[in-house]
Amino acid sequence: MRTEIEFADHAAGARAIGELFGVGPELLRDGEGWAVETLTRFGTHNSTHVDAPYHYNSTIRGEPAQTIDQLPLSWFFAPGVVLDFHDRDDGEAIDVADIEAALDVAGHRLRELDIVLIRTGRDAFVDEPDYMARGPGVTAGATRRLYEHGVRVMGIDAWGWDRPLWIQARDALASGRPGVFWAAHQADLAYCQIERLANLAELPATGFTVACFPLRLVGAGAAPARVVAIVGQP
């Protein structure tokens, strides 16, 4: 799921201006026109992105699930906390008790609309072929507990919020029942996930603000986001 970019330089821009408006390069500063770039294969999940409830299911608690453009902006600019699980093994589950213990270690008491960021350290493998197969994952129970605390945006520095897909698939096939595969995604909760974060190790545990505004793509289940931590603002 790599994004590709086509680049057109200033010379190409000068040619375009000449073709469109008849203005030659002699009428342009240094004979140059505009430089432009075109994104190709830019899916809503290719990069660091925010998932909307619609990504998980068409309905949430009996109501139509919200798409990314229908969510309040207040969700995406709020105090943050980093919960450190970088020592967990690939495929390990992060459950309710783990979340509560990590909050104690961080010295943070959750408030409504806090943004919770799960550090797994798997951003170190973002350029590796097996990136999507790595990392621990957050359980449906832990996700519900965060939701009960008023958290509506949760993020992780791994490929996905749940455990790696191949592990979920193995367990779902072995169990023969729904609710095992993609359990935290399909927990029937109206919340957002930020996936494929990086550099959480550079943040303090608490005492910062997260800005994670997604592109407003009408009707979309997710959107790319430039996620920034503003340190020193609780």
Image: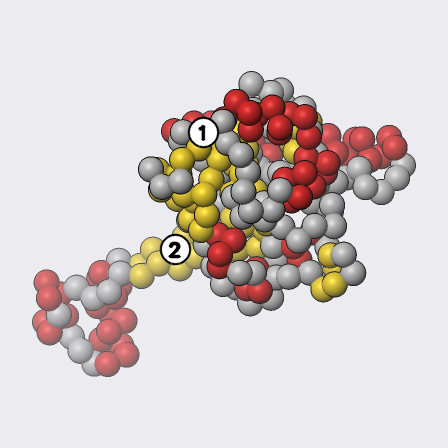
Q: Nearer the viewer, residue 156 or 75?
A: 75
Q: Give the total number of marks visible in the rendering.
A: 2
Image quadrant in which the C terminus is located = top left
- Numbered mark located on residue 205 in the image: 1
Left or right of residue 65, residue 10 in this image? left
Q: Nearer the viewer, residue 1 or 221?
A: 221
Residue depicted at x 53% and y 34%? 109
Q: Using a 10 Å C-alpha cutoff, classify the residue at mark 2 as few (fewer than 14 neighbours), some (14 to 19) or many (20 or more).
A: few
- Numbered mark located on residue 6 in the image: 2
- Residue 114: x and y, percent? 52, 44
Looking at the picture, does residue 213 appear above or below residue 121? below
Distance between the alpha carbons at the discs numbered 2 and 1: 39 Å
Amino acid carrying label 2: it is: Glu
Of the two numbered discs 2 and 1 on the same chain, state the one appearing first in sequence: 2
Secondary element under disc 1, as helix, strand or loop, is: loop
- Numbered mark located on residue 31 in the image: none
Q: Nearer the viewer, residue 208 or 128?
A: 208
